[in-house]
Amino acid sequence: GQNIDQPTEMTATEGAIVQINCTYQTSGFNGLFWYQQHAGEAPTFLSYNVLDGLEEKGRFSSFLSRSKGYSYLLLKELQMKDSASYLCAVRVRSGSARQLTFGSGTQLTVLP
Amino acid sequence: NAGVTQTPKFQVLKTGQSMTLQCAQDMNHEYMSWYRQDPGMGLRLIHYSVGAGITDQGEVPNGYNVSRSTTEDFPLRLLSAAPSQTSVYFCASSYLVKETQYFGPGTRLLVL
């Protein structure tokens, strides 16, 4: 089976930088995703890593180390609208299909 | 494009009733999937499909049926609703060879 761990809650201040960690244990690894989910809404795609290293997209960056089973999402210049749940998801190969397994999510609260 | 649409938005059922949650996408995506989201448990895969006529089970398939007669539609059927099926249900779709899954707005289901 798959096991994905991320902190339940984090708090940060507007304008600051926050790093949300995700560790995973899985077989058939085929990529790691980060999604953002505001309360009462659907998840929306933030980033995707399949190779080791850092992917940068505006204020958001995501890092992957496959050998360590570790990823983080870095949010810079935090804004109030960044208050949301951040979901780490691992894609695995299962026969001919590829399935996403999600962590429980990290609830980020941005304070003024 | 409307993207991924789901109906209904909200539903209340009595134990033992059956119903179908509708999901449609207009992006010609091959891959479609159903998740349920419960507090503290993240998103869990119920069933998925890699194309019309092909479906398979995910992590928590018991009590649910799916079919995929067209590329656009992927309905989820609850055969005999139970209180344990109270949850928020999300449908998602993507191209098979691309990474990003697009989620529908969700259906909130309460089983009494």
Image (spheres, rainbow, N blue to C red):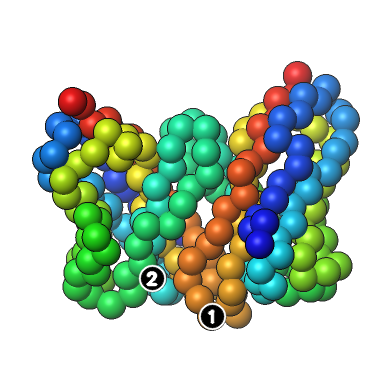
Residue A90 visible at all: yes
The quarter of the displayed image where residue A67 is located: bottom left
Indicate the quadrant where residue B47 lies: bottom right
Q: Residue at x 55, y 48 (%)?
A: B44
Secondary structure of the residue carrying tag 1 is loop
Q: Is residue A95 left or right of residue A35?
A: right
Q: Residues within 10 Å of mark 2 (few under 14, many from 20)?
A: some
For marks 1 and 2, give the CA distance: 12 Å
Q: Nearer the viewer, residue B63 or A10?
A: A10
- In percent of width and height, residue B49 lies at 70, 67
Q: Pointer 1: what residue? A: B97
Q: Chain of mark 2?
A: A
Q: Nearer the viewer, residue B4 or B54?
A: B4
Vertically, is A31 above or below B75? below
* Residue positioned 71% across, 46% down in the render: B6
Residue at the outermost top position: B112
Q: Secondary structure at mark 2?
A: strand
Going by the numbered disc 1, the residue's amino acid type is Val
Is A22 drawn above or below residue B29 in the view shown?
above
The percent coordinates of residue B4 (x first, y second) are: 66, 55
Q: Quadrant of the C terminus of chain A?
A: top left
Judge whether residue B63 can be spotted in this image.
no
**Both marks 1 and 2 on one chain:** no
Disc number for residue A31: 2
Residue at image point 67% right, 56% down: B2
Q: Is residue A25 left or right of residue B53?
A: left
